[in-house]
């Protein structure tokens, strides 16, 4: 009798697949199958949500997001079932040289703590990222409790989307570089910005005339007259009576502008889901 023969444990295969897609297949000795399960999960999960956020029309955004989440979870569950069934088909096995607890730990660390986070980090840094709006400074465009998608294919080398006046931008807060702020870009490099009473003028032209769709008035604006330095932009909150913006911290370097708000994917405040805001495209 071969003393190396061991019983295959279907429950172990299932639990390992629960921890990491493809991990159960690796336990079953199906290396190629394990690799493909993990890669398919990575390709469908985060990229699927990113594609929905970037390309799906506003009216279809919520069902498409739910479908993407359902597809990801279904793939994960099916991988668990696949590992369970495969283990049942081979109740006894002779462990291969590499099938040791140490190697399983190394694979888990590499996939769950290195490969997958790097993949997610790439999507967040170069494609799209989600943020929650914590303040009132951009009302009524953005409300406290809105969850937004910010397009990160913006203001970067070879990016098609350059910074323009009117963009709702995500940028690094100059006074605390661990924080991100969201404001409206109103002044571009070299332009003269004037704030007179409740009126904002760019090179002598009033935003309240040329950009009436996104220029709410404020009642307590301090007078300002300046030229935006080269390589910087001037930003204001739409709710100008309740906004910390370029009036207090100055113009923002273009290199600190990291994304453009594209749409609201969820909105929740006062224990209420604001259904009318879900999927709203922002300009």
Image: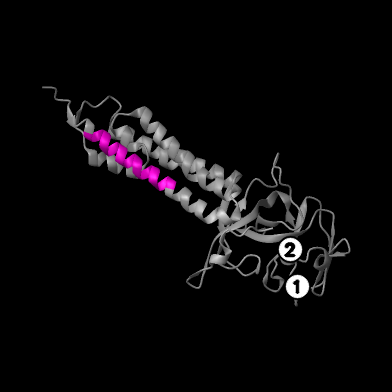
Callout 1 crowding tier (Cα within 10 Å): few <14, some 14–19, many ≥20: some
Highlighted range, magenta: 71-88
Q: Where is 60 relative to 37, above or below?
A: below
Q: Residue furthest left?
A: 1
Q: Residue furthest bottom?
A: 219
Residue 194 seen from this side: no
Instruction: Choose top left, top right, bottom left or bottom right for residue 58.
Output: bottom right
Helix, strand or loop at label 1? It is loop
Residue 50 located within the stretch drawn in magenta: no
Q: Residue 150 in the image: state x and y as whole percent.
A: 61, 53
Calculate the distance from the C-alpha at mark 1 to the C-alpha at mark 2.
16 Å
Residue 217 is labelled as: 1
**Dominant secondary structure, magenta:** helix
User: Camera-side residue: 217 or 197?
Assistant: 217
Residue 83 located within the stretch drawn in magenta: yes
Please tell me which residue is depicted at 44% across the width and 35% down the height of the picture: 39
Helix, strand or loop at label 2? It is helix
Residue 202 seen from this side: yes
Please tell me which residue is depicted at 81% across the width and 51% down the height of the picture: 230
Please tell me which residue is depicted at 66% across the width and 65% down the height of the picture: 141
- Tell me the quadrant of the picture where the N terminus can be found: top left
Disc on the earlier residue, 1 or 2: 1
Residue 246 is labelled as: 2
């Amino acid at each position: 009798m071969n003393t190396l023969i061991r019983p295959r444990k279907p429950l172990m295969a299932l639990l390992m697949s629960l921890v990491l897609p493809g991990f159960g297949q690796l336990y079953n000795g199906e290396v190629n199958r394990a690799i493909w399960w993990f890669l398919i999960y990575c390709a469908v999960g985060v990229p699927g949500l990113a594609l929905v956020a970037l390309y799906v029309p506003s009216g279809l955004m919520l069902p498409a997001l739910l479908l993407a989440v359902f597809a990801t979870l279904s793939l994960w569950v099916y991988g668990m079932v696949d590992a369970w069934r495969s283990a049942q088909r081979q109740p006894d096995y002779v462990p291969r040289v590499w099938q040791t607890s140490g190697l399983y730990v190394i694979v888990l660390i590499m996939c769950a703590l290195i490969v997958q986070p790097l993949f997610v980090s790439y999507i967040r840094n170069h494609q799209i990222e989600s943020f929650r709006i914590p303040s009132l400074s951009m009302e009524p465009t953005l409300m406290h409790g809105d969850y937004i998608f910010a397009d990160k294919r913006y203001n970067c080398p070879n990016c098609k989307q350059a910074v323009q006046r009117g963009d709702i931008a995500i940028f690094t807060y100059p006074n605390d570089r661990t924080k991100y702020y969201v404001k409206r870009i109103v002044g571009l490099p070299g332009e003269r910005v004037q704030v007179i009473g409740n009126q904002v003028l760019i090179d002598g032209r009033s935003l309240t005339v040329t950009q009436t769709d996104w220029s709410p008035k404020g009642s307590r604006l301090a007078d300002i007259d300046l030229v935006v330095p080269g390589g910087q932009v001037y930003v204001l909150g739409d709710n100008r009576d309740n906004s910390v913006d370029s009036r207090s911290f100055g113009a923002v370097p273009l290199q600190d502008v990291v994304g453009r708000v594209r749409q609201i994917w969820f909105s929740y405040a006062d224990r209420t889901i604001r259904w009318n805001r879900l999927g709203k495209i922002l300009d």
